[in-house]
Image (cartoon, rainbow, N blue to C red):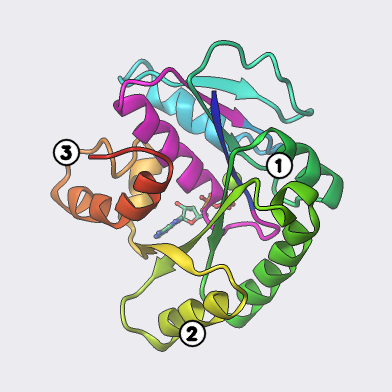
Amino acid sequence: MLTVLVGNIKGGCGKTTIATHLAVAFALSGMATSLADCDRQRSSLNWLRRRGDRVPLIRGLDWSRGIDETAGTADRLVIDAPAAMRHKAVEELIAIADIVVIPVLPGAFDEDASAYFLKKLGEVKAVRKHKRVVAVVGNRLRANTRASIHLDRFFEGLGFPVITRLRDSQTYPMLAAEGGTVLDSRDRRAREHAADWQPLLRLIGIDS
Ligand SMILES: Nc1ncnc2c1ncn2[C@@H]1O[C@H](COP(=O)(O)OP(=O)(O)O)[C@@H](O)[C@H]1O
Ligand SMILES: [Mg+2]
């Protein structure tokens, strides 16, 4: 089983958006996929409920009270990390993850919080010894704005370059409200947005 953890210390940076998209990407590629929700707000599980029985099917796991490794027979597990990840929770979750995806938003406050999180992450032994793939994903970006350029330089400087840039678009909350993603929507604009995801999808082993 390949496990992808989506986490950051900051709320609202796009953890649930990215976790749900990655689960759809894996499931679309024919993998048996589970989505574990660690957040008390259960946003991923609520999204899954809104999805109903739409294909591709994704199995939801409630990890809001802690890690439950009876995830079973899935080929792929995506973990939506808890809102405020304390150091202990970070270590426990990283222990079972192969790839750690970190959504980051532009702006000084978010960049500072993410820098702190990356520093803590770097102290975890498995990360320090390069046994985990760490992928920083820029979210809610407007191309060629100063904020977007700053974000790129900032994370480059920390040694964690931004590998994927997702644009700021109301299509994301719109689709989330109906249990959808840009990766499995027929909407023309959503299909355009889907191209933004390619570098991240390649990194997690999906070629399309
Ligand atoms: N690229 C984006 N463009 C516009 N809105 C976005 C984007 N990514 C996330 N959002 C919206 O921002 C809010 C927070 O995102 P969410 O994925 O729930 O973050 P988290 O799980 O980290 O709290 C949600 O309403 C979501 O739909
Ligand atoms: Mg969330």
Disc 1 element = helix
Q: Which mark is residue 50?
A: none
Residue 70 appears left or right of 66: left
Kindly tell me whether mark 3's CB lies below 8 Å from ligand 1: no
Amino acid marked by disc 2 = His
- Mark 1 near ligand 1 (CB under 8 Å)? no
Dot 3: within a 10 Å radius of its alpha carbon, few (fewer than 14), some, or many (20 or more) residues?
few
Q: What element carries label 2?
A: helix
- Closer to the chain start, of discs 3 and 2, is 2
Q: In this view, does 28 lie above or below 194?
A: above
Is 82 on the left or on the right of 5, as rendered?
right
What numbered label is drawn on residue 94?
1
Residue depicted at x 50% and y 78%:
151
Residue 167 in the image: state x and y as whole percent: 34, 64
Q: Which mark is residue 150?
A: 2
Image coordinates of residue 107 in percent, x first then y, are 55, 79
* Whole-number angstrom distance, CA of label 1 to CA of label 2: 28 Å
Mark number, residue 186: 3
Query: Which residue shows up at 70% across the image and 27% down it?
Result: 63
For label 2, the crowd category at 10 Å Cα-Cα, with few meaning under 14, some 14 to 19 and many 20 or more, is: some
Label 1 or label 3, whichever lies nearer to me, is 1
